[in-house]
Image (cartoon, grey):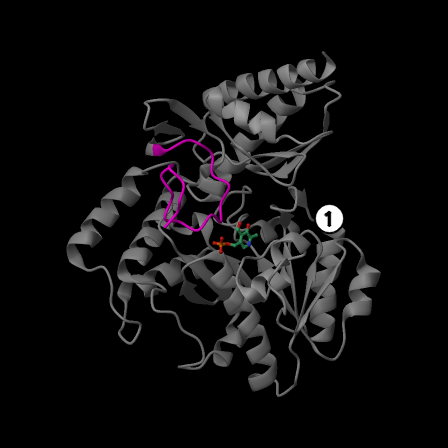
């Protein structure tokens, strides 16, 4: 019990929450409990890729709600088979493990890489190499894999078996590789780390190195996957095929779900009983995944994201040209970072007051994550607010 007269939240204060309660969403738009309307350019952090309350997903979920919500993975789950078949048909992967979040998908990937080497290959490889500024989740293993000190504070001791090297430094990577290396884990766009797309030559060299040395390549597609970058999965832009990749966020239009996908030769490493999770791939979660993927196929959403992102980028480049406050505009498809000279948190807060929701990616980077159906008109509306925000912010700074 608190002594304060203020009403005390019963939640752990793990989030610095904005003073807005969103109560309704439709397409690119959100409404708060005061009736204010917002244009959503963050999509729940790359989750609501189909916009809010997408009709086909809603319909499928309603039907599934009447049928069956949950059964144990001790039984056959036809929806799970179908969702997995859809994912493998639209990617380079051959097998899927369903779970509930990005961190859990990455845990599964780390575990699979160790188990493959130790049980199938009979080696004692266990180490996973990751990159500075990466983000892979908040479980103990995935925060250890994450290349950012702030997520590790106060959580010592961290699990053994992780090494972090600078991104785009092939020599440092080579020096970190040893007989113990099980996997290299990388994002195609360092999203939380500031929206930095990985350099094509670098990722190609990493993929070649992995093949040459029998190291598994894990690509974390938790933020970049499910069409957001203009391909189903961002690694397709680089012409590489990871051994394992992970998805979550956009996979089920906001229903909590994640998946780890891998190549055929990894299947035998996960024998019955070796890995599990109660809620992974339930009938209701996989109904949301199936409906999301079928909608993406019907509406050719990855292609749509690629096309509309060109409009977004060209408008950003045109409208922000010559503003000294803006250092760089970068991204891949509909994950866009605008790097500024100074912290942008005040701009985010002022944006909310003007009806536009977006987030940061590190202190100085404005991150835009619109849904994949975003229209040119909505982009125009968002940019009118955003450009005004940047102009006003720099004018205040000068005054
Ligand atoms: N990996 C990446 C690249 C992410 O962006 C995130 C979340 O932001 C995660 C992993 C963790 O996902 P989750 O929060 O669903 O555990």
Assess whether residue 88 is covered by the magenta stretch: no
Nearest the viewer among 107 and 352 is: 352
Horizontal placement of 82 versus 258: left or right? left
Where residue 361 sits in the image (x, y, percent)? 61, 40
Name which residue lies at 27% across and 57% down.
284
Position of residue 36 measured from the top left corner of the image (x, y, whole percent): 37, 22
Q: Residue at x 27, y 65 (%)?
A: 78
Q: How many marks?
A: 1
- The residue sitting at 50% across, 68% down in the picture is 108
Magenta span: helix, strand or loop, mainly?
loop
Task: Please tell me whether residue 17 is drawn above or below residue 181 in the rendered image.
Answer: above
* Relative to 387, residue 211 above or below: below
* Foreground residue among 125 and 92: 125
Q: Residue 8 sits in which quadrant?
A: top left
The quarter of the picture where residue 312 lies is top right
Q: Which residues are magenta?
A: 1-22
Residue 81 percent across, percent down from the top left: 33, 65
Q: Is residue 15 magenta?
A: yes
Name the residue furthest bottom. Answer: 122
Please say whether residue 218 is visible from this viewpoint.
no
x%, y% of residue 299? 39, 39
Along the line of sight, the residue nearer the viewer: 91 or 172? 172
Left or right of 373, for residue 74: left
Mark 1 lies on a secondary structure that is: loop
Whether 41 is drawn above or below 160: the answer is above
- Classify mark 1: residues with Cα within 10 Å, few (<14), some (14-19) or many (20+): few
Which residue lies under the disc numbered 1?
199
């Amino acid at each position: 019990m608190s002594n304060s007269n203020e009403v005390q939240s019963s939640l752990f204060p793990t989030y610095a929450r904005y003073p807005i309660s969103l109560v309704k969403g439709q397409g690119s738009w959100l409404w708060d409990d005061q009736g204010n309307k917002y244009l959503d350019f963050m999509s729940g952090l790359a989750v609501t890729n189909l916009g809010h309350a997408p009709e086909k997903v809603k319909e499928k979920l309603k039907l599934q709600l009447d049928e069956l919500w949950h059964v144990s993975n001790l039984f056959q789950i036809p929806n799970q088979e179908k969702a997995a078949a859809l994912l493998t048909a639209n990617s380079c992967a051959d097998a899927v493990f369903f779970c509930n979040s990005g961190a859990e998908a990455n845990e599964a990937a780390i575990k699979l890489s160790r188990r493959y080497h130790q049980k199938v290959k009979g080696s004692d490889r266990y180490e996973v190499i990751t990159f500075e500024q990466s983000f892979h989740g908040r479980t103990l293993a995935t925060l250890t894999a994450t290349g950012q000190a702030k997520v590790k504070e106060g959580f010592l001791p961290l699990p053994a078996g992780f090494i972090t090297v600078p991104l785009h430094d092939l020599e440092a990577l080579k020096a970190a590789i040893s007989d113990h290396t099980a996997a290299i884990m990388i994002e195609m766009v360092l999203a939380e780390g500031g929206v930095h797309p990985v350099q094509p030559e670098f990722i190609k060299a990493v993929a070649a190195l992995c093949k040459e040395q029998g190291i598994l390549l894990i690509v974390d597609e938790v933020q970049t996957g499910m069409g957001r970058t203009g391909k189903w999965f961002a690694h397709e832009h680089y012409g590489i095929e990871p051994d394992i990749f992970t998805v979550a966020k956009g996979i089920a239009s906001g229903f909590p779900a994640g998946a780890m996908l891998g190549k055929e030769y990894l299947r035998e490493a996960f024998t019955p009983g070796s890995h599990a999770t109660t809620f992974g791939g339930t009938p209701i979660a996989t109904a949301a995944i199936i409906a999301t993927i079928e909608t993406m196929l019907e509406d050719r959403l990855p292609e749509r994201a690629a096309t509309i992102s060109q409009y977004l980028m060209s408008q950003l480049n045109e409208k922000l040209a010559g503003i000294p406050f803006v250092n760089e505009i970068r991204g891949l498809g509909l994950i866009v970072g605008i790097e500024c000279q100074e912290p942008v948190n005040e701009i985010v807060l002022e944006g909310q007051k003007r009806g536009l929701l977006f987030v940061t990616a590190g202190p100085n980077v404005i991150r835009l994550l619109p849904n994949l159906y975003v229209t040119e008109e909505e982009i125009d509306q968002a940019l009118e607010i955003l450009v005004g925000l940047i102009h006003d912010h720099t004018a205040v700074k000068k005054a």
